[in-house]
Amino acid sequence: MAGIVFYPHFYTWFDQATEKMFKTMGFPYTSLTERFNVVGAPLLETGSNYKNACKLGDDLNMESWVAEFDEKTFLVKHKILHADGSLALEGFERRIMVTRDPSKEKGMKATAIPDLIKEQFRAD
């Protein structure tokens, strides 16, 4: 109604950017199970800090990067900029790598992030 981007769209864009980043780094989600026995990287925590409204039809640019790795979790940060370079918002996703575990109710458990993934992201 206010003519601005509906905030859940940003979270969709964050998710898509994270998936694209993994693919670009040589780790498409579709290969993680075969290569590392990883079946996903579910969200543990998300957030955004809105600085300058994005109006419908605005040209926007997004930057995403892995800011830190822990043993089983990683933090992805996102920055969305207006075409003129002004900051629209900053966001983050904390994710955990998981593997299948049929003995658990949800069928998965946390697993260590493969060193190869950490090394590739740190090298970039």
Image (cartoon, grey):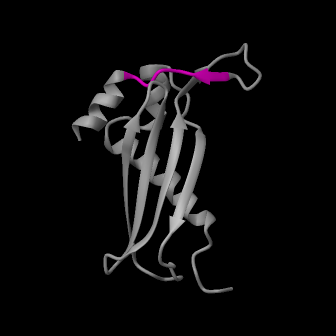
Q: Residue furthest bottom?
A: 2
The answer to if 109 sits in the magenta stretch is: yes
**Residue drawn at point x = 38 percent, y = 35 percent:** 27
Quarter occupied by the N terminus: bottom right
- Given residues 24 and 52, the one toward you in this image is 52
To which quarter of the image does residue 113 belong?
A: top left
Question: Vertical placement of 121 versus 56: above or below?
Answer: above
Q: Residue furthest left?
A: 123
Look at 52% across and 64% down and name the residue there. 49
Q: Position of residue 19 (x, y in %)?
A: 46, 46
- Per the rendered image, the range of residues in magenta is 108-114
- Is 96 rendered above or below residue 20? above
Q: Is residue 115 left or right of residue 31?
A: left
Give me the residue at 32% from left, 24% from top.
116
Residue at image location 47% in from the left, 78% down from the top: 52
The location of residue 66, given as percent across then percent down, is 38, 43
Q: Is 123 rendered above or below residue 114?
A: below
User: How many marks can you see?
Assistant: 0
Q: Nearer the viewer, residue 35 or 55?
A: 55
Query: Is-magenta flag for residue 64?
Result: no
Quadrant where the C terminus is found in the figure: top left
In percent of width and height, residue 26 lies at: 32, 36
Q: Give residue 3's position: percent from left, percent from top.
A: 60, 86
**Residue lying furthest right:** 105
Q: Is residue 46 left or right of residue 60?
A: right
* Vertical position of residue 27 compared to residue 112: above or below: below
